[in-house]
Image (spheres, grey):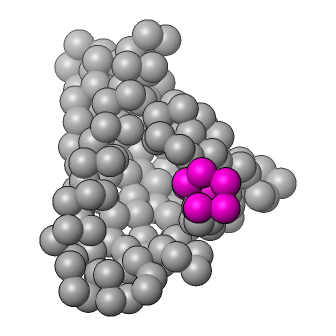
Amino acid sequence: MASFTVTLDVRAPATRVWTTLVDWPRHGDWAPLTTVRVTSPRPDGVGASFVARSGIGPLGFDDPMSVTHWQPPGGDEPGDTAGRCEIDKHGHAIRGIAWFEVSPRPGGHSHVVWFEDVTVRPHRLTRLAPAVVSTIGRIGFARALRAMAREASRHS
């Protein structure tokens, strides 16, 4: 397994950041060479499912996911409860879990924590080089979260 955590302070309220993060098809706007399509009747809540397709044409892979926990932020004021979404990754290429939390901060800002613990197939990739897979994941998700934060900040 390879795991990583990315944290980011965002100059936008927690509810705005949450809404931006759970707009699954928009993830493709922040993650290079990725498109996301919702595969469940509803895009939100426990049971929502979607597939991220990463790559170019036939040189790509699908990353199907399902939401297993859904708790939006309790508000935008410090002390309001954080929002948390947990996801099960159950694809052929990537398996594992991911979750993110969005916590309200003073001044209408928020704090995001994104965590992933995944196995990349073939398994020898994560077995032989978990630090490399973790580093690549951390760099990629940090970049994507910064792009998401720019969008959320523009709309707040």
Confirm whether residue 35 shows in the render: yes
Where the C terminus falls, by quadrant?
top left
Residue drawn at x 58%, y 76% is 91
Confirm whether residue 113 shows in the render: no
Residue drawn at x 49%, y 50% is 71
Q: From the viewer's perspective, is residue 59 above or below residue 7?
A: below
Q: Seen in the image, is 17 located left or right of residue 146? A: right
On the image, the x and y values in percent for residue 147 come to 38, 28
Residue 127 sits in quarter: bottom left
Where the N terminus falls, by quadrant?
bottom left
On the image, the x and y values in percent for residue 84 come to 41, 51
Seen as rendered, the residue at the extreme right is: 41
Task: Report the span colored magenta.
Answer: 53-59
The foreground one among 12 and 89 is 89
Residue drawn at x 41%, y 63% is 98
Seen as rendered, the residue at the extreme left is: 131
